[in-house]
Image (tube, rainbow, N blue to C red):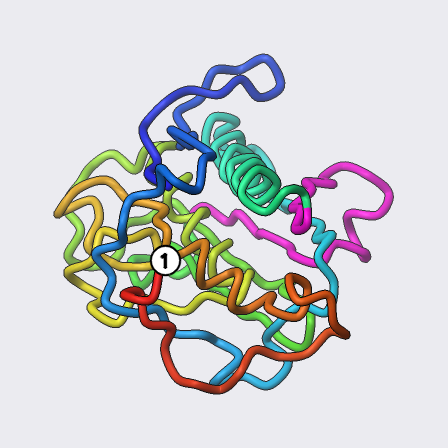
Amino acid sequence: MRLRTGVVAVSGIIVAALMPMTAQASHLPESDAKSLEILADYYPGYWWDHTDLTVAVQSAPNVNPKQLDAIHGAIQTWDQVLREEFDNLITFTDITGTLRAKHKADIVVHYVPHAGGVVFAGYAICGDHKCNNILVDSDFPVGKHTPPYTPQYLGWVTLHELGHSLGLGHATNLNRSTDLMGYGWPDRGDPVMSDCDLDGIRYVFGWAFDGTAPAPPPENGPYDCSLD
């Protein structure tokens, strides 16, 4: 699924975000990723045993509301794509601000504007059936010369890190791929959520699609994007 720059209204504020051009599987563009790493191959337990996933955002005080809304927009985009692509089998519900958010969210995104300095723009540390340590910031990594750091770019970074939370690793042709899970964007073009990304998620959640008990994905190395 290719993503295009657009706008989404969150809490009455219009912010830059990424919205799906289409939710029809037949219209998904082919990925320019050769393959996608599957994180369960490297980290035991890095897969989900349920499909009704919840996400909460925790932010530093006095952050730019447009940046914060871009993060929520990225969560909304993933939720929409997953629901429409997989007929509500996998859901991604934003529970920020609810009583459940602090201790019960499956995935927690921490927005700390200057965390990591210029070393990284996003970082996901997930564990055994949980991912409560996604960090996104507002400083460009070394080598990026694109001032200023926009809500749109923060939305891209958040989409990428949320892909990790679902169990997807990086594109194996990392620096050349504009796939969402690559590093080629924005130098080579805007990020693309592709058929391979969605097929990779289907691979990770294979037990749910097969209607069997929760089980980790097979340890068969990177998911070959040519299979889709």
Kindly tell me whether residue 184 is visible in this rendering: yes
**Vertical placement of residue 75 versus 65, above or below:** below
**Vertical placement of residue 50 versus 46, above or below:** above
Which secondary structure lies at badge 1? Answer: helix
Residue denoted by label 1: 196
29 or 150, which is in the foreground? 29
Quarter of the C terminus within the rendering: bottom left
Kindly tell me whether residue 56 is visible in this rendering: no
Does residue 198 appear to the left or right of 216 in the view shown?
Answer: left
Does residue 115 appear to the left or right of 87 in the view shown?
Answer: left
Locate residue 96, reporting x and y percent.
71, 40
The number of discs equals 1
Quarter of the N terminus within the rendering: top left
Amino acid at the residue labelled 1:
Cys
* Numbered range of the magenta stretch: 89-113
**Vertical placement of residue 82 versus 212, above or below:** above
Query: Who's the residue at 74% across and 41% down the image?
Result: 95
Does residue 20 belong to the magenta stretch?
A: no
Does residue 109 belong to the magenta stretch?
A: yes
Quadrant housing residue 223: bottom left
- Badge 1: how crowded within 10 Å, few (<14), some, or many (20+)? many
Locate residue 7, reporting x and y percent.
42, 20
Locate residue 222, reporting x and y percent.
36, 77
